Image (spheres, rainbow, N blue to C red):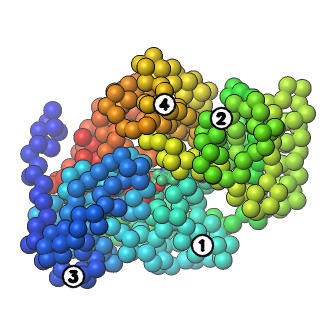
Amino acid sequence: RALRAHHTQRPPLNSVTEHDLAHFAKFLDPPAILSTLPPVSLPADELDQFNNDWMGKYHGSSTTVLKPKTTQQVSEIVKWCNERCIGIVPQGGNTGLVGGSVPVKDEVILSLANMNKVRSFDPVSGILVADAGCILQSLTDYVAPHNHIMPIDLGAKGSCQIGGNVATNAGGLRLLRYGSLHGTVLGLEVVLPDGTILDQLTTLRKDNTGYDLKQLFIGAEGTLGVITGVSILTPPAPQASNNVILALPSFKNVLPLYEIVKRQLSEILSAFEFIDRTAYDLAVKHGQGRALSDQEVEGAECFVLVETSGGRREHDEEKLADLLESLLEAEKPLINTGVLAQSPAQFASLWALREGVTEAVSKEGKPYKYDISVPLSTFQEVVDGTREHLRSKGLLGDHAVKHVIGYGHVGDGNLHLNIVAESYTPEIQDALEPYVYEVVASHRGSVSAEHGIGAMKTHALHYSKSDVSIAWMKKIKDLFDPHGIMNPGKVLE
Ligand code: FAD
Ligand code: MLT
Ligand code: ZN
């Protein structure tokens, strides 16, 4: 109760005025200020790409986007907004899937797009220090000639920024092998809500000097400060990468298959990803990746993509071929068939089938995305249960919900439950929530495995976090950001 009272005592947030723009113009070049207010007076649609999220589900009404080039400029902006009680939404590539990257009202959008320089790279340790606005793919390209890769990879790599990845603690396709950003991020530079620059941009592997403050900003979704620089450990590039797509007659086989694959491939296993049949069909329908032949997909209820990354090509290929052989020749085979990539193009194409599901779903309709951690053995039951629940409400059909699909990161216990609808409607929303969250809570799962809370799940946090945890999160938020300017309406109610 006391905490709630404290929140209500916060000063109300103010809108940006011409006076504020005049102040920003003192230290930002004219192209760094996009505003519908005079004297800039852009047409409102010039700000559409910043005000609307990737799915077209969340819409803000900001009048002003600022694109600083330096940490000092970020600090000046934040300091001013704090004094004036103006809300700020830090924005990276705007690929977030929970409405965290767009304003809930007319907060200033602070875009990191112009902070896109690599600061240093040590090819021996593999430690990369970069501005937060560097696009993930460009960092991958930067370290590649030095025989390193980024420890994170995801379908949005061409647009998302490393700062956005850190702010959401994005998981993605390599988590199974390289772990979470809580482990690979070595240091951060953050502008705190009062404008102070917190320089923790160290490049040390080991640093046990009390509280590890940087961890607070990893996954804070911009509610505690603006990340301006990231120091991250990049692994050596594997000498060989292979993949295979396996078609399974039943979801029940996924768990035993995972056990076998882990045992047989051991140290070279680098991904174990799952797509159900509907997700596969949608990926194919919308031109993502290489389709298997009709014969190969016949009778398949779901698919698993297995990737290996290792040190010697012949050794890895042999292990993968042995695995496939033993799976196909087993007395009771767990798989119908498996297709091994035979070339780098096929390797990419098989991956595209899995990575392309997000894109395909968005082309097919309007997705309700639930990104949950539940026991692996319940994945299919959660998907089927949701479909039946919608059917019982009369919402399944061409004019309401078109598909209920499951895909995700089996190796991480992370299911992506997507409900693809004709349009976003209150009826579907009410049928899905709190239904899905209650199912998650019944398994002691997480309502957000990797995408974050954003604006979408502030009301659902309590399904996965205790009252005590939420109360301490609020205390931390109030301590860092007493005026509540940093990404208001996100993560915490
Ligand atoms: P934005 O969308 O701009 O912002 C996301 C959040 O971070 C917002 O709350 C924003 O305020 C905050 N933020 C951004 N930059 C900063 C900063 N510099 N300082 C402080 N706060 C900041 N996620 C996964 O976890 N795994 C996946 O496999 C995955 N695949 C995806 C595939 C596709 C096709 C798409 C569209 C999205 C996917 N995502 C995935 C969602 C994921 O959260 C984002 O892609 C990515 O991590 C967000 O980065 P961004 O730069 O676009 O951040
Ligand atoms: C994925 O694993 O493909 C991403 O998290 C995006 C999504 O959930 O669609
Ligand atoms: Zn994912």
Of tags 2 and 1, the one toward the viewer is 2
Disc 1 to disc 3, C-alpha distance? 32 Å
Q: Is residue 285 left or right of residue 33?
A: right
The residue carrying pointer 3 sits among few (fewer than 14), some (14 to 19) or many (20 or more) residues within 10 Å by Cα, namely: some
Please say if 457 is above or below 61. above
Of tags 2 and 4, the one toward the viewer is 4
Q: Secondary structure at mark 4?
A: loop
Q: Amino acid at mark 4?
A: Asp
Disc 4 to disc 3, C-alpha distance? 53 Å
Please say if 250 is above or below 226. above
Of tags 2 and 3, the one toward the viewer is 2
On the image, the x and y values in percent for residue 196 come to 24, 69
Please say if 227 is above or below 336. below
The residue carrying pointer 2 sits among few (fewer than 14), some (14 to 19) or many (20 or more) residues within 10 Å by Cα, namely: many
Query: Pointer 1: what residue?
Result: 141
Query: Pointer 2: what residue?
Result: 277
Q: Secondary structure at mark 1?
A: helix
Nearer the N terminus, badge 1 or badge 3?
3
Q: Amino acid at mark 3?
A: Phe
On the image, the x and y values in percent for residue 372 come to 48, 36
Nearer the N terminus, badge 4 or badge 3?
3
Q: Amino acid at mark 1?
A: Asp
Nearer the N terminus, badge 2 or badge 3?
3
Query: Pointer 4: what residue?
Result: 398
Query: Pointer 3: what residue?
Result: 27
- Is 350 or 424 nearer to us in this picture? 424
Q: Secondary structure at mark 3?
A: loop
